[in-house]
Amino acid sequence: MSYILAVIYLALVLLRPQEFVTFLDASNILAIVLFLSFVFWAMSSNKLVKSPQLYMLIGLFVSMMLSHAANGWLGGSVSIFWKILPSLLIFIILSSVVNTEKKFKLILALFTAIMVYLVLHGIDQKENFVGWTGATLSQGTRITYLGIFNDPNDLAQLFVASLPFMYYMSRQQSNLILKYFYLFALFFSLYGIYLTQSRGGLIAVSVMYMVYLYFTKGAKKTLLLSAVFIVLLGYLSGRIVDIDPGEESAFERIEAWYAAIQMFKSHLIFGIGAGSFLDHYIRTAHNSFYLVLAETGIVGFFFWITMISHSLRACYAAFSVRLADMDDSDYKKNLTNKASFAVFLSLTGYIAASFFLSRSYNVFLFILCSFSVVVYYLETGNELMKNQGLQIRKSIIITLSLALLIYLSTLVLIRLGS
């Protein structure tokens, strides 16, 4: 029962019916479904799956609350507790109850159907200016949706992260009709990204495709095919070729990054307070990495980065396992049949898009991280804590190196744009 309710919760998060169906408007249905799913999980025989990602999420949870307490606002800590709690609960539930391949594939099938629905909504919105949900176009031309996807860039990020799941599902089908349905959904979602006119989304697709090519084709073919792919994307989107440090909107973004660095320098340990960036600057950071650094300091940044890096590492550990008699060519061909490779690509695309969005604590990120726990267990039969551990020293080095890189690159971009 916990699994069924968790699937319903995922559908509600993505479809957002509570935002346009009148009788659901005041029902707080998301919280009710999640609470019931957690209760059924707690009463079931499904044990808590201990993973580095879980511990890092708990650490991020605590550091976000401390970020407000350290700045003298205990009320902010309480507010953040209730905001981030659903993400923690759905992570625990999904990583525990999605314990078979069939259950995981059902979730991916649901994702696919919802992406098709969202693109159809976008087409309706494009034709009529207002979609059937009441969501309107952004800037008169860019499709949007509702709630956490009411920005075209957020919607593009969702499409990007879902593409590998559709490709993986198409590879799993013996039925030609289903195979072609998933391939249609993939290209239809690419059209959805085009309709969002999101430069970040297009760049994320390029990054994800390059990673795919690297693992399946090798480095040389990656360079050649990536160049062709990027030129094609540039031709399809007039906005992508405008990425320039001197261009007005781009420089405003860089100025926001510089402001984030200044906030980080003045509140090094715990930051200015999770969710407080707009209290200190006129626009958002437009970058999830900068946002975490500014709002939660080096402590929160450590937990956030380590949660993501452990998720990527878990997927890599799962799909890099090969049979003793499998040569390199067979291994590369088999990669696309691995759910862990699909989740790895999905996380890669999501994080690439996050470099242009302030969506550091979006519930969808934590859902993807829970998938990394699921696929590792399904494909190796082991728990992450036994095989991977926390690797604290390596995580600290990664965190400090990234923080330094972000700081130095911002100074360079400011100089180039001036």
Image (cartoon, rainbow, N blue to C red):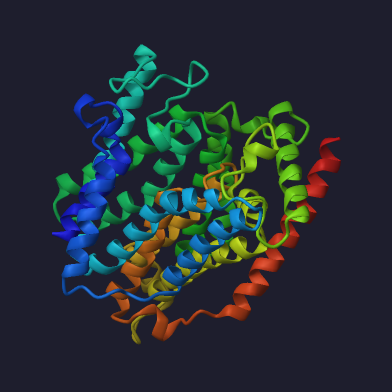
Pick the front one: 245 or 45:
45
**Above or below: residue 254 compared with residue 398:** above
When asked about the image quadrant of residue 105, the answer is: bottom left
Residue 100 appears left or right of 79: left
In the image: residue 211, left or right of residue 270: left
Q: Is residue 12 above or below residue 69?
A: above
Residue drawn at point x = 72 percent, y = 32 percent? 252
Residue 4 x %, y %: 16, 55
Residue in the foreground of this view, choosing between 166 and 10 = 10
x%, y% of residue 206? 53, 46
Tell whether 14 sits left or right of 60. left
| Horizontal and vertical percent position of residue 140 | 49, 15
Tell me if residue 162 can be seen.
yes
Residue 349 in view in this figure: no
Which residue corresponds to the image point at 36% horizontal and 16% vertical from the top-left?
A: 130
Residue drawn at 48 percent across, 22 percent down: 138
Residue depicted at x 48% and y 62%: 217
Residue 394 at x, y percent in the picture = 61, 78
Residue 120 location, quadrant: top left
Q: Nearer the viewer, residue 196 or 172?
A: 196
